[in-house]
Image (spheres, rainbow, N blue to C red):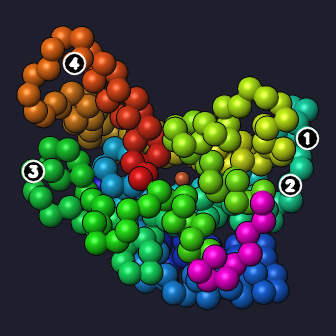
């Protein structure tokens, strides 16, 4: 597992705070800084996902991922315009949404979302470095993000709300209500939510590639562990047809988890 030094952790944290300073102003900036102050100790070391082969599963992975998605969103937004898209959002709205799309992963006011996995078998066999803290309320990551922003009195406009809400795109079934509509009058009225989803998806996939590249000497071992993890099945045998459906279902879930780090 990747390990950041204390200096790297602080360096990333300062980059995030600097981005808040440079992007926002007035009351919104003040409220955001208060929120970041509240979460400082927890956010600096939060991972972006819980399993080793998912994206940025290490202490400090959350801040690193957020910075990565902000940078990617700016690039995707430019590319969108370049290829003929209409940009109906400001860079502030874009960075705000990218910066907070995974805010729910730092947990809530009571405790963190990810806690170290203390089950040795699950750590070694499934690569579960972190597990979910069941002491806090069960909420989707994006819903918790929006809850936390309102709790700290940070104003979130409609475009930003929708962009955070649907940042997992169609990997989250709940988003079909917004993204899979067949009546043009009900479709998203601006396309920033797509930019945020594409940026998160792209950054996450690149982070997976980075993980695979990270240690060329251990690449074979890492890939074989990845394949073992995916082939593990626990429980009773089911009738053939059902088993096939289950495998397909599980593959879809694996793909989602692989890309977004098992958001709940
Ligand atoms: Fe993300």
Residue occupying image coordinates x 37% and y 68%: 137
From the image, tell me which residue sits under label 2: 89
Q: Nearer the viewer, mark 4 or mark 3?
A: 4
Horizontal relation, residue 85 to residue 248: left or right: right
Q: Ligand 1 closer than 8 Å to the CB at disc 1?
A: no
How far, Cα to Cα, is label 4 from label 3? 25 Å
Alpha carbon of mark 1 to alpha carbon of mark 4: how far? 46 Å
Q: Nearer the viewer, residue 8 or 243?
A: 243
Quarter occupied by the N terminus: bottom left
Q: Which residue is mark 3?
A: 121
Q: Position of residue 132 (x, y in %)?
A: 30, 61
Q: For the residues carrying marks 1 and 4, which lies nearer the camera in this image?
A: 4
- Tell me the magenta residue range: 150-158
Measured Cα–Cα span from mark 2 to mark 3: 47 Å
- Of badges 2 and 4, the one in the foreground is 4
Along the viewing direction, whichever of 256 and 236 lies nearer the viewer:
236
């Amino acid at each position: 597992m990747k390990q950041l030094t204390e200096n790297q952790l602080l360096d990333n944290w300062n980059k995030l705070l600097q981005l808040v300073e440079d992007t926002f102003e007035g009351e919104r900036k003040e409220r955001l800084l208060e929120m970041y102050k509240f979460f400082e100790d927890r956010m600096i070391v939060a991972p972006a996902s819980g399993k080793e082969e998912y994206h940025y599963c290490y202490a400090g992975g959350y801040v690193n991922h957020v910075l990565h998605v902000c940078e990617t969103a700016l690039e995707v937004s430019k590319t969108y315009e370049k290829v003929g898209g209409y940009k109906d959002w400001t860079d502030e709205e874009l960075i705000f949404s990218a910066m907070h799309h995974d805010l729910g992963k730092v947990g809530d006011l009571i405790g963190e979302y990810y806690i170290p996995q203390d089950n040795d078998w699950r750590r070694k066999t499934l690569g579960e470095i972190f597990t979910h803290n069941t002491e806090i309320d069960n909420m989707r990551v994006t819903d918790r993000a929006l809850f936390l922003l309102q709790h700290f009195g940070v104003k979130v406009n409609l475009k930003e709300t929708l962009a955070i809400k649907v940042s997992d795109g169609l990997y989250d079934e709940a988003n079909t209500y917004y993204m899979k509509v067949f009546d043009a009058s009900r479709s998203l009225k601006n396309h920033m939510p797509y930019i945020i989803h594409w940026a998160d998806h792209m950054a996450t996939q690149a982070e997976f590639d980075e993980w695979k590249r990270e240690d060329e000497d251990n690449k074979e071992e890492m890939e074989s562990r990845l394949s073992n993890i995916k082939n593990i099945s626990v429980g009773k045998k089911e009738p053939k047809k059902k088993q096939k459906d289950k495998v397909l279902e599980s593959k879809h879930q694996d793909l989602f988890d692989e890309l977004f780090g098992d958001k709940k």
